[in-house]
Amino acid sequence: MYESTLTILLFGLTLVGCVYTGAAIVCLWRYARQTDRMPVSHPSLTVLRPLHGDEPCLFETLSSFMEQDYAGPVAYVFGVADRHDPAIATVERLRKAYPDADMQLVIDPRRNGRNGKISNLVNMTPAINGEIVVLADSDMLVGPDYLTRVIGALEADGVGAVTCLYRGVSLPNIWSRFATGWIDEQFLPNVILGMTLGLTKPCFGSTIALRTETLWRIGGFSAFTDQLADDYAIGTAVRRLGLTVAVPARPVLGHISASTTAEALLAQELRWNRTIKSIDFGGFVGSVVTHMLPFALLTALADGFEARDGLLIAAVLGLRAALHHQVKTFVQKDAMDLWLMPLRDLLSFAVFLGAFIPGFIEWRGRRHGLRADGTLTSPDTTTG
């Protein structure tokens, strides 16, 4: 058995991580077996797509929202803050590809608070004319049953909003594949386990669908103009009305992992981790147990790499491979290569530690600080 206090502590954290990973595997399996709810009616929808810049695969992601099997009327509203924004060309390309679609482009430079996306949505608000509002980040890729499944979930009793799980979609470069690995094999299992245990109540920018009346009741988008985690804040506001935010097992959307350099990958993941830390500090600290492979390696280092340490590392890798397989089954796509998995886990642990170091939030080409309440400060103000 291990003898030193440090080795025992590291071994204990590894074991807790193993239990946590096993529970995540079970929760993924059970969550995938949920029964879908199809809509009874087909109310009118306004789909809001705030845009900024010419992102990778932008035409493909926007097109996927146009090709829906939803039976009701759908109006699409795109918004940019700059009349020279290159995303406008993509919208014009959409107009030609879908000439019969109800499509509108809002170009409005007015700045409403420090959150650029929410500022854009505030400017797009006058174009809302549907019974239900659906907003989604510009890097989301959906299937043709997306709107049907989302509206079906929204019709359930007591549901005030619907949000969607998402998986990573990688570009042909190593950094994008690493980003996909974090989404698929850490973020997604952690969210599903957290929801199953009642430890987290998420709301994601992947999708937020809510009745227009509910949007007005929570103060409209103007109530969230300085929030970094605007999606989480909207979900919290909906729950304060006594309503729930549904997270159906399907659809699982695709998130384009656009990182092309190590610097871009680290900036994005530090922003994500610091955002989670600002939302739930205790939960973020507790998530240290999800890093079982780094702790297994640290245990072996502290123990002098005895034979028992090799068995521990082998067991951890086996359990990690089982999670990899279950994630692949859940998202119904090829997952990150197994050989990248240990490197991805070590990088995730480094980013987790880095989230505690004061620094900036890099977002849309601007640097912000972050207050303790999750609101953004002026650009170039250090965050804690």
Image: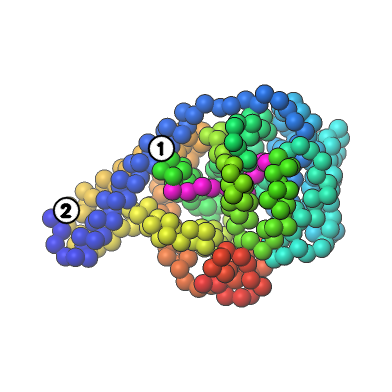
Q: Amino acid at mark 1?
A: Cys
Residue 316 percent coordinates (x, y): 29, 47
**Residue 109 vs residue 302, the one in the foreground:** 109
Separation of marks 1 and 2 at Cα, in angstroms = 33 Å
Q: Amino acid at mark 2?
A: Ala
Q: Mark 2: give few (<14), some (14-19) or many (20+) Cα within 10 Å.
A: few
Residue drawn at 84 percent across, 58 percent down? 108
Residue 284 percent coordinates (x, y): 44, 58
- Indicate the secondary structure of the residue bearing disc 1: helix
Is residue 208 found inside the magenta-colored segment of the image?
yes
**Residue 352 vs residue 249, the one in the foreground:** 249
Residue position for label 2: 307
Magenta-drawn segment: 199-210
Q: Name the quarter where the N terminus is drawn.
A: bottom left
Q: Mark 1: give few (<14), some (14-19) or many (20+) Cα within 10 Å.
A: many
Residue drawn at 59 percent across, 32 percent down? 157
Residue drawn at 83 percent across, 49 percent down? 126
Residue 234 shows in this picture: yes
Residue drawn at 54 percent across, 68 percent down? 372
Tell which residue pokes out farthest to the bottom in this image.
381
Is residue 198 found inside the magenta-colored segment of the image?
no
Q: Give the vertical position of 162 relative to 124 (above or below).
A: above
Residue position for label 1: 27
